[in-house]
Structures are given as structure tokens and as C-alpha cells.
Image (cartoon, rainbow, N blue to C red):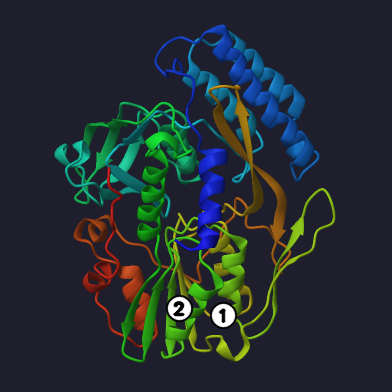
């Protein structure tokens, strides 16, 4: 683990993901007045920073103070902690901003539904099923179209909100899915979540033999392994670079591109990439574009300098470039793809991207003194305007060539998107071979 990542890791661990504190803080029992006051305090702290720092002083026409007062009144009438925390999230959701959201206290458990779903075009499909999960036992398959989750249709524009609700804000013991298989047969499946209890209070001091800190470090190392960049080469004709997130150093990015320079063409696979650090975006831009480049203008409450990237000069890659994106490509991944289009540096293929492009800061908070509850919020501090004068927020990047897998492709493990990209660069890779190039790896439970 390099020093930079270690620093980022500690910031996230200590400030944002602290213990779900008081020993009575159960999600299933009724709230006490003390606990309700803590949640009201959470909303007050976050609302203050939104009022002070949110990039749009008019809050998109939302009466921010009135909205906060509305949600506080609802919290005062609630008996459920889960629903009370949901009201904190609802206040921020009113801004309809992809990068402004509530980071609730960490739960005293890990949970998993055993599957992943994703928007493909205007439809939603099961894309992963964990081996040994209840989802696998109940017969969920990659390529099943998801028609409803607990009675709600998973529309592309709100799919991220469903994921946030069921995985972050209010985890459920199970989900009821309405599915359609690639042959057109419909069925209903009840999938049970797997819950694993964790410590209600985590000791990060490392004193008196406490091992919690080392468990957290091992978990971070596992996550780093899962999020590593991967490379496949096809002679001197083509290199395929899979970048799962934007949290890499200049040296790491330079090593990728040093290897890429030995090839005539480069496919940069940003499918599923949620974005990340602006610095990593700058490194990759500098290694692909021949000249210094303005990435975007930053628009906020005060005058801000534009984001720019310096070229690596003769160390930059000069061959052909194809960028792959999908509905889960977000933030920095979208900006990179759009730069490639605007600068005519290459071709973007795949599915329309997420449309989640703002610049935000993560704020950390806590309530309590002896045993402390940590929580946080992401608050947008600037919009990013590309050289065409437009923001990608709620719009995303439309590929130069729209190429998406069918349900049958997903069921068979084929990747027609990567295969087509390679073919346009003069390299023959079958959809079956492409589907095996970067096998998915599940995090250990």
C-alpha cells in the first residue's frame, strides 16, 4: 500500500466510516428521544454546510431552509431509526445532485443480496450472481432482465437511488424480484440477503492487543487488489487497459502508458468505473493527449481556476485510442471519455454513461462524546463545464458507437462490446474470448 493511498484510506476510515456507535443503536427497535435528538443533530450539521458551501446559492430553486424544516418535522414524528435517517437523506435528495448525498453511520453488519444489476440501454439486467448465495440457489442468472424490485420498476434514471436505498441507507432482509429470462419467460423470485455481524464499537487505537485496526488494513488491501488496473496485450497491435476506478498515482499511470507505447492501438475500458480522484484523471489525460489541455471550467459560488492537465510530451501515447463506457461509468470516467470525443483523440463505444459529473467535497461529522457516532455528507462545490459549454450532469456521454450486450450475451459470458472495439482496430477477438479477458472477482464475505 503506497503512502498516498494510505493517507486517503485513513481519512475515509477514521472520518467517514466510524463505528455505528452507541450500544443501543439498533435499527430494529423504536427510537428513544436521545437517539432522535442525535439524528436531528446530524441533519443540522449537514444542512449548515450545504447552506454555506453548496455551489448553487439558489439551490436549483429549492427553498433549502423550508426543506430541512420539513424533514426535521418528519423525524420528530418517526419511531424508526431507519426512516429517520432516510429523512436526512431526503433533504439532500431534493437538490437532485449526483454528488450531494448523506453518508450514514456504519452499520454493525455487512450485508449482500448476492447479485448485481445494471442498466443496459433503457432496460435493467442481472449482471453478476455470487456463487453460493441465495440468489444463485433461487436461480438468478446473468442476463435476466429485472422488471421490478419490491414492486418498483428499475428505471435507468433512478437505478442509482435504488442501489443507495437498499445497499446503503436502508438494507433489507431480502428483495422480491420480477424477472424475464432471455427466452422471454417471466417469474418472481424472493432473494434473501446475507448478513454478517460486525463489532458495534471499533477500536482503531491498536492498544491493549486490539486487532480491529489490522482487520481494517487487510480489508483495504483486499479492496486495492480487486480495484487494480489490468492489462491484456495482442502482439504489437493492441493493448487493452481495464481501469476500474480513478485512484492511481502518476507512476502507476505512466507504467501503463509506457507499456501501451509498444502497441499501435489502445483500448481503455472504463465500464463500471465510478470515477475518483481528479489527480488520476489529469495523469491519464496527460499520458494520452499531446499538449496541455483544459479539462473543464469549474463553476461555483466564487471564481475558480479551470481544471487543466499537462502533457507528458514525448512519453505520451500517440497511437489509436478507443474508450469503452457504460451506464456505470461516472464522474472522472465520463469526463475522460468526453475529452476524447471533443478533442477527436479517439472513438468512444458502449452505452450512455451515468451523467454523474460534479466536483464535490466529503464532509465529516460526529455526534456524541464518549462513544461517538461518525457520519458524513458529500456536498457539491462546483459544476464542471466542458469545452462545448455544457455540463455532463444528468446527461452523460453518448458514445460515438452504441454497442451493448444482449441478455443472451450476458447469460453466455460474451463481451461483444470489447470484441467490436478490437475489430475496429484490426484485431480479431471473439466475444467469447473478450468475455474471459477480465474475469469478475467477488470480495470475500
Residue 315 at what x, y percent from top left?
A: 56, 88
Identify the residue shown where x is 69% and y is 77%.
Answer: 293
Task: Say whether residue 340 is left or right of residue 219.
Answer: right
Q: Is residue 422 above or below residue 150?
A: below
Quarter of the figure with residue 308? bottom right
Identify the residue shown where x is 31% and y is 26%.
Answer: 173
| Residue hosting label 1 | 287
Instruction: Tally the numbered discs.
Output: 2
Q: Is residue 241 above or below residue 171?
A: below
Q: Is residue 238 above or below residue 26?
A: below
Point out the image quarter for the N terminus.
bottom left
Circle 2: is it few (<14), some (14-19), or many (20+) Cα within 10 Å?
some
Task: Say whether residue 136 is left or right of residue 122.
Answer: left
Q: Secondary structure at mark 2?
A: helix
| Residue hosting label 2 | 256
First-in-chain label (2 vs 1): 2
Q: Secondary structure at mark 1?
A: helix
Identify the residue shown where x is 19% and y is 43%.
Answer: 185
Residue 124 at what x, y percent from top left?
A: 37, 47
Residue 19 at what x, y percent from top left?
A: 48, 31
Task: Say whether residue 129 is left or right of residue 314.
Answer: left
- In the displayed orientation, state which residue is furthest to the front: 208
Amino acid at each position: 500500500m503506497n503512502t498516498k493511498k494510505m493517507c486517503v484510506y485513513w481519512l475515509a476510515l477514521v472520518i467517514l466510516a466510524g463505528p455505528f456507535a452507541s450500544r443501543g443503536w439498533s435499527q430494529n427497535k423504536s427510537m428513544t428521544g436521545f437517539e432522535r435528538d442525535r439524528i436531528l443533530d446530524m441533519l443540522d450539521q449537514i444542512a449548515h454546510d450545504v447552506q454555506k458551501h453548496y455551489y448553487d446559492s439558489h439551490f436549483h430553486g429549492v427553498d433549502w431552509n423550508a426543506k430541512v424544516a420539513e424533514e426535521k418535522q418528519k423525524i420528530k414524528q418517526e419511531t424508526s431509526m431507519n426512516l429517520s435517517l432516510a429523512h436526512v437523506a431526503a433533504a439532500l435528495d431534493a437538490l437532485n445532485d449526483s454528488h450531494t448525498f448523506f453518508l450514514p453511520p456504519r452499520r454493525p453488519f455487512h450485508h449482500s443480496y448476492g447479485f448485481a444489476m445494471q442498466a443496459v440501454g433503457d432496460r435493467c439486467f442481472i449482471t453478476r450472481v455470487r456463487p453460493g448465495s441465495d440468489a444463485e440457489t433461487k436461480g438468478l442468472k446473468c442476463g435476466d432482465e429485472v422488471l421490478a424490485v419490491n414492486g418498483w420498476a428499475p428505471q435507468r434514471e433512478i437505478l442509482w437511488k435504488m442501489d443507495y436505498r437498499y445497499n446503503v441507507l436502508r438494507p433489507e432482509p431480502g428483495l422480491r424480484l420480477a424477472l424475464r429470462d432471455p427466452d422471454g419467460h417471466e417469474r418472481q423470485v424472493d432473494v434473501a440477503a446475507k448478513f454478517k455481524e460486525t463489532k458495534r464499537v471499533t477500536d482503531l487505537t491498536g492498544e491493549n492487543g486490539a486487532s480491529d485496526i489490522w482487520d481494517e488494513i487487510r480489508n483495504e488491501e483486499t479492496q486495492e487488489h480487486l480495484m487494480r488496473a489490468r492489462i491484456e496485450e495482442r502482439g504489437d497491435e493492441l493493448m487493452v487497459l481495464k481501469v476500474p476506478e480513478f485512484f492511481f498515482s502518476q507512476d502507476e499511470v505512466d507504467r501503463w502508458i509506457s507499456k501501451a507505447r509498444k502497441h499501435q492501438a489502445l483500448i481503455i475500458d472504463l465500464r463500471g468505473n465510478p470515477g475518483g480522484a481528479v489527480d488520476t484523471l489529469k495523469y491519464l489525460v496527460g499520458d494520452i493527449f499531446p499538449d496541455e489541455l483544459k479539462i473543464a471550467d469549474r463553476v461555483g459560488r466564487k471564481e475558480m481556476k479551470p481544471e487543466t492537465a499537462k502533457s507528458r510530451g514525448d512519453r505520451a501515447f500517440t497511437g489509436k485510442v478507443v474508450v469503452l463506457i457504460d451506464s456505470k461509468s461516472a464522474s472522472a470516467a465520463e469526463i475522460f471519455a468526453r475529452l476524447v470525443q471533443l478533442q477527436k483523440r479517439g472513438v468512444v463505444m458502449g452505452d450512455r454513461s451515468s451523467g454523474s459529473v460534479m466536483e464535490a467535497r466529503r464532509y465529516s461529522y460526529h455526534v456524541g462524546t464518549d462513544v461517538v457516532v461518525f457520519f458524513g455528507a458529500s456536498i457539491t462545490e462546483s459544476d464542471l463545464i466542458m469545452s462545448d459549454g455544457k455540463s455532463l450532469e444528468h446527461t452523460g456521454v453518448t458514445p460515438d458507437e452504441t454497442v451493448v450486450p444482449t441478455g443472451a450475451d450476458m447469460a453466455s459470458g460474451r463481451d461483444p462490446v470489447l470484441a467490436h472495439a478490437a475489430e475496429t482496430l484490426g484485431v480479431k477477438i471473439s466475444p467469447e474470448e473478450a468475455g474471459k479477458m477480465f474475469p469478475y472477482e467477488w470480495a470475500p464475505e
